[in-house]
Amino acid sequence: MQLSIIIVNWKSADFVRQCIASIRAYSRGIEYEIIVVDNASPDDSLAALQHLAGIHLIASPVNLGFGGANNLGVTHSRGRMLLFLNPDTLLVSPAIEAMVQCLDFSPLTGAAGCRLLNDDGSLQTSCVQAYPTISNQVLDNEWIRARFPRARFWGPAAPENPDHETPLPVEAVSGACLMVPRAIFEQIGGFSNRFFMYGEDIDLCYRIHKAGWKILHVPQATIIHYGGRSSGQRDDAAFGDVVMRESVYQLLSQTRGWLYAQSFRMAICFASLVRLAVLAAGRVSFLDKAKRSRLTSTFSRWFRILRWSLGLERWAKALSGAGLNR
């Protein structure tokens, strides 16, 4: 078997169906299998997916998180290459074939990612990522990125030009579409169970690179990524904010040491206090009701982040290495 495509589902059956249809439409030149892992979805996703023909459906009794569910899928796979693909993605070209060819003709490459587009056709800059540092985490917001898109601490940028054909060496690629040769994935031990959600892709790329392999961004491989919709549209946005920072903390502890990770926590604490002060001032200014409501919501999210930085959101750490019944 040439390729195993592993899709983790959590309350996203409609997206899974569309994703699989696009795979079949644009991947006729390679031999592949599709494995779908339902991550204990609390809705009727499992029943809906059972009607899909030609896939291997695995039902996890608990939510293992992104990395854990992908590891489970790998144990049921046969391909010499593994593609980890988000359900909220849509092929619009033979992107998977281009990635397979890249790995076949680049023997020193341990992982490959593609160009991810928003549904309006604009580029998702997150398809190419840098290893986290205190500076790029504290300064990571849309306003700063828009004004300093080429700043060095963001890492190399994905090519804006869709005709760019040369694979680009990068530090990490997005887990929304990540291809790894099976031998290398098994050599480094697969996805780490230290991360429940967020950070697994960067950690995997970091360990692949440490083992002596390159990470390549393949610009001629293009996929639409709807972004965040495969998480079931969680009402509590602060959940993701807190889990993301816990994942970065765990990654920094592993790669840069405890002291650096603690410094990151302190920097997030300071950044949270600054944000909360600005948001509090905005709430008492003469804003219309809709803007005041948005500020209140943002204030609540940053208050949760502040609580995490002070060690008060202990549940986030408890997620690491344990499935979550949701």
Image (spheres, rainbow, N blue to C red):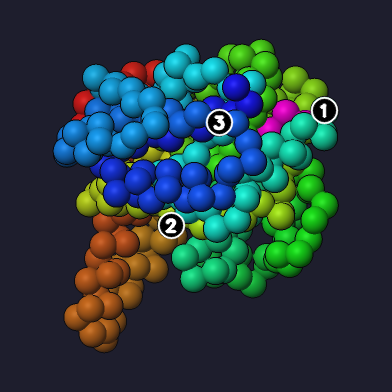
On screen, residue 19 above or below 150: above
| Residue at left offset 73%, top offset 60% | 159
Real-space Cα separation, disc 3 to disc 1, in angstroms = 20 Å
On screen, residue 84 above or below 295: above
Residue 48, position in %: x, y? 22, 39
In this view, the residue in front, 156 or 249, is 156
| Residue at left offset 61%, top offset 14% | 186
Q: Are marks 3 and 1 in contact (CB under 8 Å)?
A: no
In this view, the residue in front, 196 or 44, is 44
- Assign a secondary structure to mark 1: loop
Q: In the figure, residue 209 lies in which quadrant? A: top right
**Mark 3 or 1 closer to N-term?**
3
Mark 3 neighbour class, 10 Å CA radius: few under 14, some 14 to 19, many 20 or more: many
Residue named by callout 2: 226
Q: Which mark is residue 157?
A: none
On screen, residue 307 above or below 78: below
Q: Is residue 66 visible?
A: no
Residue 53, position in %: x, y? 34, 34
Real-space Cα separation, disc 3 to disc 2, in angstroms = 24 Å
Specify the segment rendered in magenta: 109-113
Q: Which mark is residue 32?
A: 3
Q: Amino acid at mark 1?
A: Pro
Real-space Cα separation, disc 1 to disc 2, in angstroms = 31 Å
Q: Which mark is residue 107?
A: 1
Q: In the figure, residue 259 lies in which quadrant? A: top right
Magenta stretch encompasses residue 284: no
